[in-house]
Image (cartoon, rainbow, N blue to C red):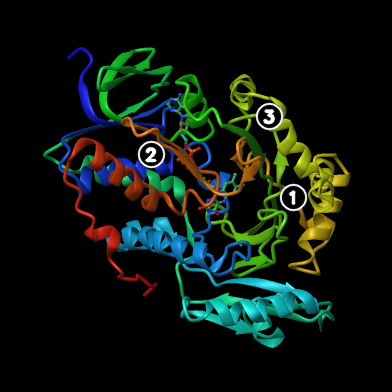
Amino acid sequence: MANPLYDVVIVGGGVAGAALLYSVAKFTDLKRVALLEKYNGVATVNSKATNNSQTIHCGDIETNYSLEKAINVQRTAQMIVRYACQLPPAARDRLIYSFPKMVLGIGPQECEFLRQRYEQFKPHFTGMQLLEKAQIADIEPKVIQVNGHDRLEEVVAIAVLGDYTAVNYGLLAQSFVEQAQSVTDKVVDLKLGSLVREIEPVGEHYRVVTPDGSLMARFVVVSAGGHSLLFAHRMGIGLEYSCLPVAGNFYFTPQVLNGKVYTVQNDKLPFAAIHGDPDITMPGKTRFGPTALPLPLLERDNMKTLVDYLEVLRLDRAVADVLWDLFKVRDIRNYIFKNMAFEVPLLNRRLFLQDARKIVPSLQLEDLEFAQGVGGIRPQLIDKTGRKLILGQAEIDPGSGIRFNITPSPGATTCLGNAEQDLLRIQQHLGCQFDRRWFESEQVAVPE
Ligand SMILES: Cc1cc2nc3c(=O)[nH]c(=O)nc-3n(C[C@H](O)[C@H](O)[C@H](O)COP(=O)(O)OP(=O)(O)OC[C@H]3O[C@@H](n4cnc5c(N)ncnc54)[C@H](O)[C@@H]3O)c2cc1C
């Protein structure tokens, strides 16, 4: 059939697009939905397991989250766990993992900050515990012990011990697609190797153009990472935004941690403090990172996206002002320089070691191995009108049957929550049924 008409076309087969495909197929009465992904598999960019930190962010150990943000994120994080727990146990266990997790306070200032935060958050996060040195050592001995002695600094931790804390977002995306395609009374088309070149309005609909032809959509959702903004700009939408892509690198060490160990974030640099995590794709290793290096690319290791980035940057006075304002802050400036130094051979491991030793003080240089080919890019938006960097995710919705999602972090954790928001807009625009009960369920799934 030439130019088939779909109710919803989703551009981008990362975990965000896949979660929406699943949600449209499962919870609406819409009959025709398609997902277009330019590569030959889903979740090969930021949602690939090796390209992110594999954390289910709940805001309990992420000290840059306000209580309000944490409560919101926790709700969407629970959706992922609930989704996985409704699968057969073997499938569930490939997707989500239960590791202890904690955030460390080191030194009197950070310890006091964590003690206060614990009192504020505890009523909303019932599994939260405040651990003193000896209790931390029971769970993570290498965080406390150096050469057979306890480290000297004051240390406390906020910990959550019995939850699902890690997820393979790549496999989660694949699972969403499989579940969507198992819905029998609908057309659920997955079109891999379909590079979307253009989206153009045609009457009340949109034409989505690929090299192999085009298809028509009553509603389009673009969840194509940094490329979402590029599509918006090309349609004259979201021109008030520019983009600052921030790449993250990691280092492997032998297994020195049993779970996820975060550190207190600097207010001015909310994603800068590194953490140590078990890598679910590399049993027996601990992964430290990420670093945060501004890179002029929309996709890591894809030099072709340099041109796309220059188009999306739309460098003008407002963008230059935001970047300059960031650079003027001493902590941020030093951090940028440090992250540039992280790229200098010989110096990089030594510098990174200093940061990693905050978590495991006994680490040695020879323990650190640069994680080649690991780590993605966060496309952080610059708000030109408000003259500031937007640190979380953003959606651009002109209200005309198209939506653009830009999901730096914690966009993988919030994939089902974002799908819910997309569906509310789709429902409003198309007047379809949306059974929201599953999203609103308060049932909390915990490891058996
Ligand atoms: C270092 C790092 C650590 C992170 N850690 C975490 C974490 O622990 N927890 C968490 O929740 N989040 C984390 N994130 C963020 C998380 O990875 C992203 O929010 C999430 O993967 C975004 O999913 P997405 O589907 O929006 O984008 P992506 O996974 O990037 O998918 C976008 C898709 O769009 C496709 N596409 C692009 N252009 C086109 C086109 N023209 N036509 C067709 N398809 C196209 C791409 O090929 C890609 O498959 C981290 C990110 C980084 C960089």
Residue at x-position 25% and y-position 36%: 429
CB contact under 8 Å: marks 3 and 2 = no
Which corner quadrant of the image does residue 138 belong to? bottom right
Q: Which quadrant is home to the C terminus?
A: bottom left
Q: Which quadrant is home to the N terminus?
A: top left
The verdict on label 2 being within 8 Å of ligand 1 is: yes
Q: Name the residue beneath numbered marker 3.
A: 296
Residue at x-position 20% and y-position 12%: 2
* Residue 105 sits above or below residue 82 on the image: below
Which of discs 1 and 2 lies nearer the camera? The answer is: 2
* Residue 209 sits above or below residue 422 on the image: above
CA–CA distance in space, label 3 to label 1: 25 Å
The verdict on label 3 being within 8 Å of ligand 1 is: no
Report helix, strand or loop for mark 3: loop
Looking at this rendering, what residue extends furthest in the front direction? 385
Using the image, tell me which numbered label, if any, was put on residue 290.
Answer: none
Q: Name the residue beneath numbered marker 2.
A: 17
Identified by mark 3, the residue type is Pro
Which corner quadrant of the image does residue 278 belong to? bottom right
Residue 12 in percent (x, y) is at: 41, 32
Identified by mark 1, the residue type is Glu
